[in-house]
Amino acid sequence: MKSVGTMLAVAAVLGFSASASAQTLNAVKQRGSLICGVTQGLPGFSSPDDRGNWTGIDVDFCRALAAAILNDPNKVKFTPLSTKDRFTALQSGEIDVLSRNSTWTLARDTSLGLNFAAINYYDGQGFMVRKALKINSALELSGASVCTQTGTTTELNLADYFRANKMKYEVLALATADETIKAYDAGRCDVFTTDVSQLYAEKLKLTNANDHIILPEVISKEPLGPVVRHGDDQWFDIVKWTHFAMVNAEELGVSSKTIDEALKSDKPDIRRLVGTEGNLGEQLGLTKDWVVRIVKAVGNYGEVFERNVGSGSKLGIARGLNNLWTKGGIQYAPPIR
Amino acid sequence: MAISGAADARPARAAFYNDPKVRGIFYQLVLFVVVLWLGYEFVINARDNLRAAKIATGLGFLDNTAGFSINQTLIPYTESDTYGRVFVIGLLNTLLVAAIGIVLATVLGFIVGISRLSPNWLLQRLAGAYVELIRNLPLLFQILFWYLAVLGALPGPRQSISLLGEVFINNRGMIIPRPVFAEGSGIVLAAFALAVVASIGLRVWARRRQEATGQQFPVLRTSLALVVGATFVALVATGFPITFEKPELRGFNFAGGLRVIPEFVALLIALVTYTAAFIAEIVRAGILAVSRGQTEAAYSLGLRPGQALRLVIVPQALRVIIPPLTSQYLNLTKNSSLAVAIGYPDLFAVFAGTTLNQTGQAIEIIAITMAVYLTISLVTSLAMNLYNARVRLVER
């Protein structure tokens, strides 16, 4: 199946149409829906719930984008992609935006022909092991078998970390997150490694979640965020500012509950945010009330975080680095003015 | 012997454009030009699109550092090696599973195929059930089944199954002692090789003698004695230079020794059993294609059933078997790319998978991978065709 995906993508790149400068915004408006690349199922980030609705922080980002452009958060078509196929799918124009906990690196930003629009989750790589092994630190992992997903920065960080600490290891690289966690659960590996947020999410899938612990070390920087193709700056701006709008809304105290009061507010920065003053949304190619649409659809950044991965979810991850810069985190958005 | 009668009644020549030969050449030329043009357009268009999207192109990435690890490498490899080396490792892993798979599938396929024709009712039905079960289930499913069966049935490293304290089996694989070659091992290996060559010579000589005089010679027993004897004598003479490094449980898993990873075992079992089911049917068809009279003639010459099969029936059946057998070998090789489902690091997984994802050079990598599978298939075909030419019926 993966091979078919790759071949299709190659065929699409080879195809006769698909000029790279095509206006993605117009394409989305004409189609009446946004095509958004997501994971094949990662609780908290993008996974279908028991009724088949996609939920998660990355899914809500796509919904926010659809709300801003099409005024309907449900006009999104989700395309589940493996780590292996995700960038090819974006390059070839199969999807409009990739919102799939992808790490921003220099190589991906340049030679893959992609642009990372923003960072909607600051993550780092960690390790999970069985409690029975009585291991307290990643530095005790020499000689271990490690399960990881292929084609990720995780695979490279893992190699760097063990090399730097002169430890031996055996890697088992599998194609999907599900296969990886299954191999770990079956005892093929001693260690399961991926981004910490994902460790919490995957832990829920294990037979006995309580028999496993996540080690304290965080061995890498994993800034995750939405990605677009090179060559369409307007689309790049829209994706980027959709995230900034959500962060700014939280900073200004505008949430899905307070949005109606915000529309009556006389504070200049809130008036600019909700479009009662100026025409900032139109400068982006959207409407004046674009932020109102976003906040009404999914809420501000803080609401999205808490609902999907934070205290309101099964994962229960603390805000930590992802708190606003005013509250000890590093989520910081340029001003809307 | 002159031909009498002038050729004055020659039919009128048609216009050249109505000549079927000329037309044929014309259409072929048109097709050729169209294909060339299409290919050219594809290449130019892909290049322009990639350039417009500012995606790096070219084969320069093969010299970049890979930075990831691979858990089965037939040649030395570290994370600081290049993508070029990753390609070689993936290719070797593919060739390893394909080569071993082809040999085992052939053996198993012949056994099952012949069993299906056995007069023994139980054996015949068992072989029939095997073929019908295995060849009617999807291969990917079988690979996953074997992988989960292998992993599920085996204990963790600390509870390893031990065979004589030398070989250990657990869910990390099978660990066997690693031979360590000290000084003088060269002589032992040379003696072994010499004995093998001598055995082959003996076989040729025995066959010639049998053809000339009808006398038989016990080739198998003599060869075995020769190989074992020569190797042992060399071992004693050099003072046993080949020792074995015993695997030891240290930390998470066994250290030392050679390890066969479970992914390899699962993939190999699945490929072998699946392909063998098809080969069995081919073998059965080939044997049934040899007329019954040949068997009867062989029996009336006084040959035992085993001899009749080996000397009369199988050689004739081979003529029917070889061509479809070739395509089964090609299938096995191509099917080995399903390894990606269980994380066996074959060419498709580490090169068209991980490397493609890390570098983003989709077109180059897919093209290289396609070229490699094509080459492997063509070489296999060529070898089988040469063999086919040898076993072809020689008509006098």
Image (cartoon, helix red, strand yellow):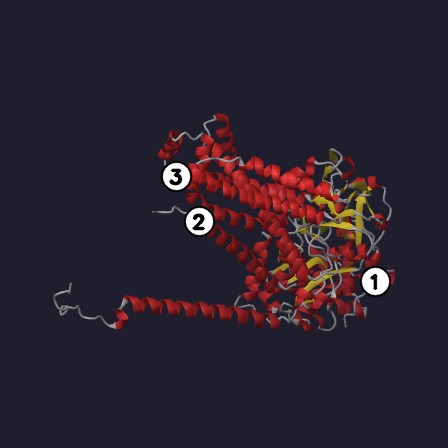
Q: Give the residue at x 57% y 35%.
A: B221
User: Which residue corresponds to mark 2?
Assistant: B390
> Toward the viewer: B40 or B214?
B214
Q: Quadrant of residue B138?
A: top right
Q: Are marks 1 and 3 on the same chain?
A: no
Asked if disc 3 and disc 2 are in contact, CB closer than 8 Å, the reply is no
> Toward the viewer: B323 or A154?
B323
Q: Give the residue at x 73% y 69%.
A: A276
> Toward the viewer: B369 or B294?
B294
Closer to viewer: mark 3 or mark 2 = 2
How far is the residue under mark 1 from the one under mark 2? Answer: 74 Å
Give the number of the disc on residue B289: 3
Q: Is residue B111 above or below residue A314?
A: above
Q: Amino acid at mark 2?
A: Arg
Q: Quadrant of residue A286?
A: bottom right
User: Which residue corresponds to mark 1?
Assistant: A330
